[in-house]
Amino acid sequence: MLLKKIETRSAHAGVIGLGYVGLSLVVAIADAGFKVTGIDINPEKIERLKRGISDVPDVPDAVLGPLIKSGQIQVTTDYSVLSQLDTVNICVPTPLNENRTPDMQFITAAVEQIAQHLHSEQLVILESTTYPGTTEEIVLPTLQPNSSETTLENDSNTKPPSLSPDSTESLQVGRDFYLAFSPERIEPGNSTYFMTNTPKIVGGVTPKCTQVAKTFYEQFINKTYTVSSPRIAEMTKLLENTFRSVNIGLINEVALICDRMDLNVWEIIDAAATKPFGFMPFYPGPGLGGHCIPIDPHYLSWQALNYNYHARFIELASEINSSMPNYVLDKVIHALNLHRKPLNGSNLLILGVAYKKDIGDTRESPAFEVIRLMLDKGAHILYHDPHVSNIVLGEGGTYHSQTLTSALIESVDCVVILTDHSAIDYDLIVKHAAVIVDTRNATRTVQNELDKIIKI
Ligand SMILES: NC(=O)c1ccc[n+]([C@@H]2O[C@H](COP(=O)([O-])OP(=O)(O)OC[C@H]3O[C@@H](n4cnc5c(N)ncnc54)[C@H](O)[C@@H]3O)[C@@H](O)[C@H]2O)c1
């Protein structure tokens, strides 16, 4: 029955957590013709969304507004709507606790709400990035309290579906309701690969769960790829992000070595990247940023410890990547030293505070740590970022993005490029700056006054 509703797109879909992932998903599902209800705990966000105002740059108001207005997308803080939904995708945050262990409170809270409204022929999919075992060890026991007694591999196809189960008997996964894990792979700002043209990994608790979840995604995603269990799907996502974190750690280490050898690491990467096989370029920078790469590998190393395994690559990469802000500080001290100036009391212009180019996302941005280190040493900071109008630096207060003029560039002792936004005129920067520390090779096309540029 649910399969038919999905295939005819008459199923009522739901998404819990309307952030970067959830809101993009809501729109993709609605575009396929489904009626969608989004649930979020943040009432201000819900009010903005009801007016068609999106917080997510990849979901423009012009796309969201008409779908809200027509009623195809509805949004609410009220979980009781779950009882009317045929499908529910969970897209809540999975951050780290202060001691850098997985913070599961958002998943737990969402799943407890689903459990209260779970009904027959409902599909539940966890999309939040998490450690292997979450779907079967945290989500399933909440939705089906007797789950440890059931054989998960068995779809219980011999029993008829229990559409109105006895109140003493909980709904059975794979028979009454369906549960799967499917990691989100969206990358903010990537205009080549977005949700619908990036293959979707699907791993259900039972084969029937996988089939139902796959059929759901097939309605709005070009390609699905099924795996044998939620654990495999959970681990796949962690492999993808750990791969990036470790390779960035490696190239940052190579940059540190090249610095000592007085070799240009950027030229070396470009040369190595001409090899058509066996090499994939990664680039050094001021440190890791964003919602995923600095966080997700710690979900894996934490779970590995539970299996008595110390994940050395992950820890080493994290150590090197988190040392990069201090390295940038050393470069700035060196640049000022060339002009016989101390960092203490110098005026620095930071270019770019977003964690990567051409987006306004500052989550986990290394710029914050670099600026904090500079302020600690007595530097005066100004910043310009075409995508971020202001930043709040704890006790450092609120800073506003400055208009980039030649007078501003000339007024500071050093310009520090932390994000290589395309909208910035780097020729103008080099022409007017006393000295530049370039952590992203943003000045690669500049031809003149190269002696002013210090790269990492
Ligand atoms: N942002 C990305 O690029 C990206 C990419 C792939 C995977 N992910 C993963 O997807 C998940 C979500 O990330 P995001 O970037 O969308 O997070 P986000 O912080 O942008 O949004 C999360 C939303 O969930 C809401 N929320 C929190 N608890 C809730 C609850 N109990 N019920 C309802 N709503 C709740 C918050 O108010 C917020 O609006 C995370 O696990 C993340 O690691 C993110």
Image: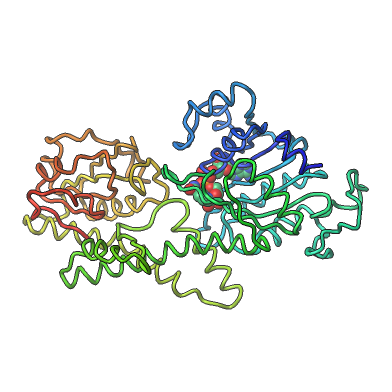
| Residue 171 place in picture, x, y as percent | 84, 51
| Location of residue 446 with respect to 49 vertically, above or below | below
Q: Nearer the viewer, residue 44 or 449?
A: 449
Q: Residue at coordinates 64% horizontally, 61% vertically from top-left?
A: 227
**Image quadrant in which the C terminus is located:** bottom left
Name the quarter where the N terminus is drawn: top right
Residue at (55% x, 38% y) in the render: 23
Percent coordinates x, y for residue 250 in the rendering:
35, 69
Q: Nearer the viewer, residue 93 or 293?
A: 293
Looking at the rendering, which quadrant does residue 351 occupy? top left
Residue 97 is left or right of residue 250, and the answer is right
Tell me residue 153's x, y (percent): 78, 64
* Quadrant of res 270: bottom left
Q: Is residue 178 left or right of residue 379?
A: right
Q: Position of residue 75 (x, y in %)?
A: 63, 31
For this view, does 357 lie left or right of residue 243?
left
